Amino acid sequence: MSEKLRTPLKNVRRLGSAHEGSDHFWKQRVTAVSNLVLGIFVIWLMSRLVGADYAQVKMTLSNPLYGLPVMLFVISMVVHMRLGMQIVIEDYVHDEFRKVVYLMLNTFFAILVGAACVYAVLKLSFGA
């Protein structure tokens, strides 16, 4: 076949989409729904604990029916935050080196925030 009759498709076949868009889309939607459900629970719990002393908060969070949903909320929020910032970075940072650095920093920041929050909940739940 003549070279001038070929379309540019030959240049991108099997080099296009990484097929991760729908996975990312669904992770964002699932975390959004879990944030809504768990967020309502956490708001209810925090409104119930307004004015409570440290011992009361510690006793409440030591109950797995309260402590686990709070930790799940933190994890879901951190994953959702990381996914959202990843989209912003990928869309608006055009320099590849900066993009990679910002994506790495985004992941490290999400891990740091998530670990600090889970540590705080665990510390309240188990002692100290």
Image (spheres, helix red, strand yellow):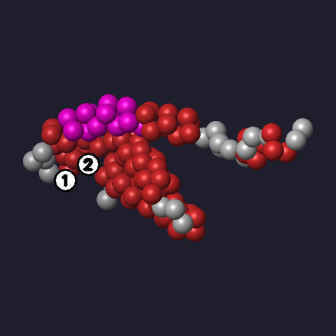
Q: Quadrant of the N terminus?
A: top right
Residue at point 58% right, 64% down?
A: 96
Q: Which residues are magenta?
A: 31-44
Amino acid type, mark 2:
Lys
Provide the major secondary structure of the magenta segment.
helix
- Label 1–label 2 contact, CB within 8 A: yes
41 within the magenta span: yes
The residue identified by callout 1 is: 54
Q: Residues within 10 Å of mark 2 (few under 14, many from 20)?
A: many
63 within the magenta span: no
Q: How many marks?
A: 2
Residue projecting furthest to the left: 51
Q: Nearer the viewer, residue 73 or 79?
A: 79
The residue identified by callout 2 is: 58
Residue at point 76% right, 47% down?
A: 11
In this rendering, position of residue 86 left or right of residue 54: right
Q: CA distance from mark 1 to mark 2?
A: 6 Å
Q: Nearer the viewer, residue 124 or 1?
A: 1
The part of the image, by quadrant, that contains residue 13 is: top right
